[in-house]
Amino acid sequence: MAKKIIIIATGLYLVFAGLYVLRTSLMAVSYIESIKDKLPKNFDPHSFLYAVTPFIIWFVITGIGILYRKHWARYSLYVFCAVSILFGLLVSGVMVFAIAHAKNLMPTFPIKIVPLILRIIILIFLPVFFYVFFSRKSVRELFS
């Protein structure tokens, strides 16, 4: 029973993560549109959306595949986990470096450390959990 709940939660997480990235991308495009006169003339404000759309589609399709327990979705999740872990290590490393070299850090230290911890949890620990959970034989057998 707990396995099925985790599988459903993972699928919903991926679908909602894709929709969240879509919403954030649309907000970025609308902001870029609002400052279009300050940007170079040949700059396309939708280029960011074009770059992010394949990832949005990948998240949503993988999430739906996980909900339907498709074998290919499990492999897609492995790739997603690997990319997320690598990206999380890169972003966390940059943030640790920036925090370590910031001047006058002590008054704002809690404000700077909370986003770092959240990124580590979302981009590293959660994908490691997904990878380990979906690699177990009892879970693999649930996927056709």
Image: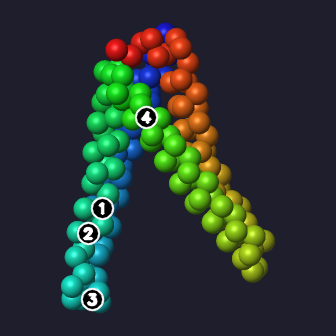
Q: CA distance from mark 1 to mark 4?
A: 20 Å
Type of amino acid under label 3: Pro
* SS label for mark 1: helix
The disc placed on residue 47 is 2
Label 3: which secondary element: loop
**In contact (CB < 8 Å): disc 3 and disc 1:** no
Q: Give the x, y percent position of residue 123.
A: 55, 47
Residue depth check, mark 3 versus mark 4: number of the one nearer the observer: 4
In percent of width and height, residue 42 lies at 21, 85
* Residue 28 can be seen in this image: yes
Q: Nearer the viewer, mark 3 or mark 1?
A: 1
User: How many residues crowd mark 1 within 10 Å: few (<14), some (14–19), many (20+)?
Assistant: few
**Quick check: 2 left or right of 33?**
right
Q: Please give the name of the residue rendered at 59% of the width and 45% of the height, measured from the top-left corner.
A: 124
Q: Earlier in the sequence, mark 3 or mark 4?
A: 3
The residue at which mark 4 appears reads as 77
Q: Position of residue 108 (x, y in %)?
A: 70, 70
Q: Secondary structure at mark 2?
A: helix
The mark nearer the N terminus, 1 or 4, is: 1
Q: Is residue 125 left or right of residue 134?
A: right
Q: Position of residue 134 (x, y in %)?
A: 50, 24
- Vertical placement of residue 98 versus 118, above or below: below
